[in-house]
Each structure stands twice: as C-alpha cells, then as structure tokens.
Amino acid sequence: MNIRPRLITRIALFSALIYVLSWATAFLPNVNLAFFIAFSAGFLWGLWPGLAVGAIGMWLWTSFNPYGPASLPVMLAQVSGMATCGLIGYGFNRMHRESTGGLSHRLWLVLAAIACTISFYLPVTVVDAWVYQPFWPRLITGLPWIGISLVANAIVFVVLFGVTLHLQRRELGART
C-alpha cells in the first residue's frame, strides 16, 4: 500500500479533530462529532485511512481525556468501535457514490449514523458491564444513553454531510 504524505497529513488532522472536538463536547453527554469525522475519513479516503482516523483519534481521546484514561478493555472496545465508523463511511461511499441528495440519501445517512452509533456503543457498553459488574444492571443502565447518541448522530450526519461532499469535490479537483 502506497501512502502519500498528503494522506498521512489528513489522517493526522482528522485524528486530531476527533480529539479536539471530543474535548469541546465533553460536557454534552453522549454527543460527539467523532463518529462523523471517522465516517467522513472512510468516505473520503478509503478503508484504511478511515480505520486509522477512528482508531488513532479515539485512542487519543480515551487516553488523554478530562475524566481520566479508560481501563484497557474499555479502551480497546472504544478504539475498535470508532474505527468501525471509518469502515461504515467507506462502505457508504461504495454504495452511494452517485447519490448526493434527496430523502432517500438522508435516510441512508441516518442509517449510517445508527450503524456507527451501535457499532461503537454496543461493544463499549458490554465490555464496561463485564469489567465493572454487576453485568445486567450495568448493561441495562447504559443502554438508554445510547439513545442520546442515536438522535445526535442522526442529526449531525444529515446536517454536516454536505461538508464531506465539499471536501470530496475538492479532493477530486486536486487530483485532476
């Protein structure tokens, strides 16, 4: 795989955006732009850059956040879950390359937001409940918080996807 310096810079920038915007939204429970950033990286630059942005950005956040670092099992669940958002962005680009608007496109974006949210929070919630016990009460208590992220991500993906399309057009223009 040939990685150009320009792509490495973009991966670093988007990873840093996950970290910085996670700080900016730290006081809004379960509202985070990190999902959209990792998704956009996968959409814009492909599978491996999307996975890298999600993993590096979430590793930075989970290691150096204002509430202290997460335990290793929870950290691994968070890092792999956010990397999955890059995978979902890559898949979204492959499936919806031609579509850029309309109700159908927005519904697909909402489904992508739901997939990103569940692929992150389901393993994180299960690992958290497993590590900190008692399993079932902790798991059930954590599930409603996923709803906040589902709604927030659905709104963010639909509202901000135009920015991703703008970046894609600029990328395509820079290559020609």
Image (cartoon, rainbow, N blue to C red):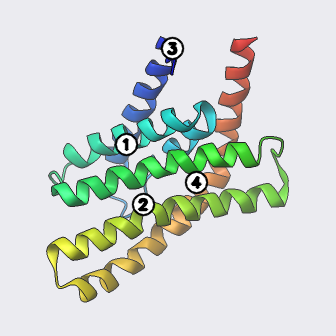
* Residue 156 disc label: 4
Query: Measured from the top left, where is residue 70 in percent x and y?
Result: 18, 56
Q: Quadrant of residue 47?
A: top right
Q: Label 2 is placed on what type of residue? A: Phe
Q: Which residue is mark 1?
A: 55
Q: Earlier in the sequence, mark 3 or mark 1?
A: 3
Q: CA distance from mark 2 to mark 3?
A: 29 Å
Secondary element under disc 3, as helix, strand or loop, is loop
Q: CA distance from mark 3 to mark 1?
A: 19 Å
Precedes in sequence: disc 2 or disc 1: 1
Mark 3 vs mark 4: which is more N-terminal?
A: 3
Residue 36 visible, this angle: no
Q: How many marks?
A: 4
- On residue 148, the disc is none
Report x, y in % for residue 158.
67, 54
Instruction: Sort mark 2 into few (<14), some (14-19) or many (20+) by Cα contacts within 10 Å.
Output: many
Q: Residue at x 36, y 47 (%)?
A: 22
Image quadrant containing the C terminus = top right
